[in-house]
Amino acid sequence: MNRDHYVQRYMQEALSSLHQSEGDEVPVAGLVVLHDQIIGIGQNETRQSNDISAHAEIIALKKAAKFLHDWRLNEADLFVTMEPCMMCMGAIRLARMRALYYGLPNPVTGIFTVYKQISMQDFPEIHIQGGILEQPIREKMQSFFQSKRG
């Protein structure tokens, strides 16, 4: 399978999992893939758990580490529908992820969008690619926020 197909396939999986998200949680989903197998899935749970660290990425990383019985995820890839925040990027780096693929830039807390002094090149050990399925993810996010304001 070529890389583009691989990336599109798993970002679509992450996007599809958003349809199961309900309540007041900002609809962000993340999944960890190792050797073409999903080993961790997470969605934002900060509001329901009253836990500031319950971001989709952190939950997916924890589930993947539990699955592997190892916190090192150096052969795994993370797919997340929104650009990670600084906390999540720290966890991604500490987990030694092979790659990070994200969809929508995050203008509020995104590590690369908000913190202009930090760039993808600051993480040379991780392949990072953004903007994957950005438009359908943007539409999902806009729909969520419109329903909250409406």
Image (tube, rainbow, N blue to C red):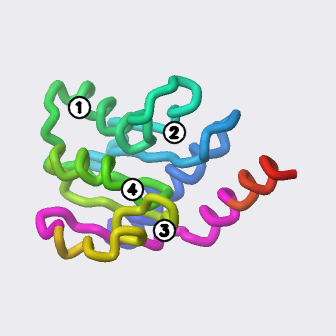
Boundaries of the magenta span? 123-141
Could you say which disc has been placed on residue 65 in the image? 1
How far apart marks 3 and 4 lie (CA) works out to 9 Å
Circle 2/circle 1 CB separation < 8 Å:
no
Q: Residue at x 34, y 45 (%)?
A: 32
Instruction: Kindly identify which residue carries mark 4.
Output: 84
Q: Where is residue 62? Give x, y as percent.
A: 30, 31
Q: Which three-letter amino acid code belongs to the residue tagged 2?
A: Asn
Q: Which residue: 14% across, 49% down?
A: 96
Which of the two marks, 4 or 1, is nearer to us in this view? 4
Q: Nearer the viewer, mark 2 or mark 1?
A: 2
Quadrant of the image occupied by residue 116? bottom left
Kind of residue at disc 1: Ala
Whether the magenta-drawn stretch holds residue 125 is answered as yes
**Percent position of residue 20, x then y:** 65, 37
User: Could you give the CA–CA distance between mark 4 and mark 1, rounded to whole angstroms?
Assistant: 19 Å
- Is 83 left, or right, of 120 in this rendering? right
For marks 3 and 4 on the same chain, the one whose residue lies earlier in the sequence: 4
Q: Mark 3 points at which residue?
A: 105
Q: How far apart are marks 1 and 3 (CA)?
A: 26 Å
Query: Label 2, label 1: how many angstroms apart (C-alpha)?
Result: 18 Å
Q: Which mark is residue 44?
A: 2
* Along the line of sight, the residue nearer the viewer: 131 or 47: 47
